[in-house]
Image (tube, coloured by chain):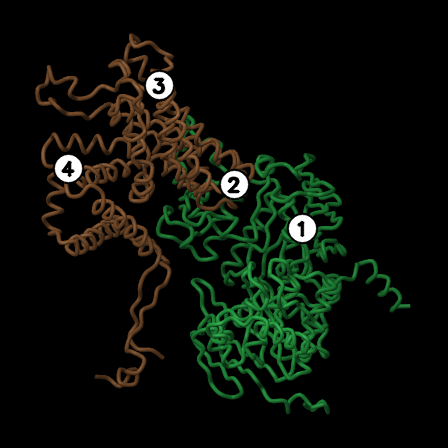
Amino acid sequence: MTESTTANKKRGSFRIRVEPRLNVPPAWYPAAVTFGALIVALILGGVLISFAGGDPIKSYLHIANASFGDIGVLSDTIVKATPIILVALACSVAFRMKLWNIGAEGQFIMGAFGASTIVLTPVLSAETPRWIFIPVMMIAGMAAGALWGFIPGYLKAKFNVNEIISTLMLNYVAVAWVNFWIFGVWTEGGFQMSPKFPDTASLPRLLDYAKTFPILRGLTTHLGLVIGVVAAIILWFIIFRSRWGYEIRLIGDNPQAAKYAGINITKNVIWVMMLSGALAGLGGMSEVTGVVHRLQTAPIAAGYGFTGIIVAWLAKLNPLVIIVASILFGALILAGREIQPSGVPKMIQGIILVCLIASDFMLRYRIVIERGEE
Amino acid sequence: MTNQAPSTSEIPLIVEMRGIVKRFPGVLANDHVNFELKRGEIHGLLGENGAGKSTLMNVLAGLYRQEAGTILVNGEPKVFSSPRDAINAGIGMVHQHFMLVPSQTVTENILLGLDDPRFFLRLPDYDNKIAELGEKFGLKVDPRAKIWQLSVGEQQRVEILKMLYRGVNVLIMDEPTAVLAPQEIEGLFETLRAMIAQGKSVIFISHKLQEVSAIADRVSVLRRGVATASGVASKGVSRQELARLMVGRDIVFALDKKPCQPGDVVLDVRDIHAENDKGLPALRGLSLNVRAGEIVGVAGVAGNGQSELSQVISGMRECKKGQVLLGGDTVSNHTTLYGIQHGMAYVPEDRTHVGSAPNLSITDNVIMKKYRKPPILKNGLLDMKAAAKLANELKVAYDIIVPNVSTPVRLLSGGNLQRVILAREISGLPAFMVAVQPTRGLDVGAIEGVHRLLLAQREAGAAVLLVSEELEELLSLSDRVYVIYEGKIMGEVNIGGETPDESLVETIGQMMTGTPLDQIQKEGVAAHD
């Protein structure tokens, strides 16, 4: 070819350079990159499925069918997605301020516990109407979750205790705490669970209206979905339209600049951790009153708190995108069980997260391929 | 060794850098810089923060790669693609921030990354080797001590030993005295002298004039990426001359400056004391005042307490003693918010880390001090339409060149970012503004724009405190100039309006190097008698 290529043969005729982006990429670009990352993740997952002896296309079709195939499974997907929405919202608000709350799991469990105390203490009798029962349980769940967020928040703000460690540890404390109550105090005939909640203390489900609308028969989607969607909308307003949200975004991006703008960071660390805990606690309340209907550790402490971390990042911490991402993950959880009890679906989740985090690089840097050298 | 002290031109060059160009996004850090190092000399490299000293030396040490220019070591052209290449060519660098493993011993740190010992660590043998090497160069440190047990000065000795152990002949020291106490500095100087006595060469990066003239044989000065002096014998040049080469005198604008009509005292700083980030005293009984409608400059070589002064005034640093009054209210040791609410604007030194939130949009950045009040705050929520309107108005009024105001500010050039910050601060109609190095790193056009904005503030009746290391800037903008040295004011001069004469510049230069004004005047009178 040309002279320069011959001259450069020894060193290779091109080199790849990475440089920071100096202009704003077009609006479609982040969405396209995210979508691309998902595709790459599914391809990588497919490779691993075929290594495991499966047919990737068949597996993916199966997943799609088992989670969106008909209205029944769609409803089940949404039931799975509901707690994830609230927990992911909880994670997103903390992450936006660069507070690494990985204790949403524990805050979720405490929320379920807080809501349950209303029934089991009992604070309200079984005859109390639903419209009183549900709001009181919501408040109790949020308060218990907020308390579980307050502890690491306060420790972080006052003594600079690493919130990753403290929130992680509090997850175990929450499980042990609930176990204590269901083993000893509220046990039903020696089993590790509380008695079943009365109907008045349960979130209404679609199947409750099957008499009037037969199509709703067997659909377990409950009011928690509405709670989650409303919470997402409110959180969007808080983050992008309120004074407080502006402070959260400013602290998250540059704490020095926030200090310079006269914002009290210590106070905000505590409040944001409490908000995060309250949202996760609301998720726990929704799960215990909408699905489980009794206090029991196994179905409550099922790892929603950790899935929420992934979903929050998948949605780039945007509350409204979290709703969509949660449904995707609800589908993965539900359909995953159809393929294999644990291995492959968990693996696909992990691959998606890794690809998404890696794709962020493409938003901040561009790759330049140069021909020739020196 | 040559003991006859031959004339300098006979000593061979060990390192020669020719026409080095290095660019960073938006900044030309080195603009065709030439640099020469002779065998057996201590070569001082002077320059302000951001002048390109560290960049140039990082190129020499193999950390950065130059875009143009060549490096010759012992007359042979070299291409360094990593620090290892540079060390193999005999060039090593001791960075300002040490790169040591705290939980390991001195010996382990020195051996880290070497091929020998390969598998079995016979540490005692190496302990002795390192102790011997230390003795040879007067670097006393226990090879068996763990790094975390050592003082900063001792850690620096370990870093130097690390380089000597790797057999370097050229040692680059990046601001070595910044972390040391005065008595440790003397120890370091002795070590450096011991090294050149044994044929090594040293490059000493600093922005402290006194140190460079005390230790260096020859000096090079960088200013805004350009070499303003190359290899001048340090004996033959005065500190004032060096100060002038560092801060420069080349920008002269015809600014139409109206006569000063000062009003009441707005800012009154009374005998303040404060510490720097390392807990050492930075301000030691400093007093000054600024009246409405005047620009008051603070001149001084970097690191004499200017940053701490602006931080104490703005409420971002604790004031140990004394107080700062703004329009009669004490603002020192209050929250930053208190100062903002009392009409204080602050243009910080560090635009990217303090003055702005890089990933947030221009709109989000301009409302930083306005979101608590209408029109931005409406019914308890932020009115983002009003915010965008404000941002667009400021974009036009302050000539911010960007496609739209939702651009994150990290993508702006230095000049545009500074205009965003100034727009934000000035549009709050401050009674008082402190601006620290507002033109650092900007190109000439941007500098002129910033100067006009500051003068407009003065004409609008605001009190402006301008902290700068650019003497020319201070002389052309200020009505009065205070000179700061080691946390104290050495004196105050009136600029008056007419072109400042040489003797005034001379006086400021003397104050910048630590002579109080009254002493200069006494000597002046004595000379006349």
The answer to whether mark 1 and mark 2 are in CB contact below 8 A is no
Q: Which chain is brown?
A: A
**Mark seen at residue A161:** 2
* Foreground label between 1 and 2: 2
Three-letter residue code for mark 2 = Val
Left or right side of A292 for B76: right
User: Residue B320's x, y, as percent?
Assistant: 71, 43
Secondary structure beneath dot 4 equals helix
| Quadrant assignment, res A331 | top left
B192 or B516: nearer the viewer:
B192
The residue at which mark 3 appears reads as A186
Q: Earlier in the sequence, mark 4 or mark 3?
A: 4
Three-letter residue code for mark 1 = Gly
A65 or A369: nearer the viewer:
A65
Q: Which chain is green?
A: B
Secondary structure beneath dot 2 equals loop
**Mark seen at residue B279:** 1
* Foreground label between 4 and 3: 3
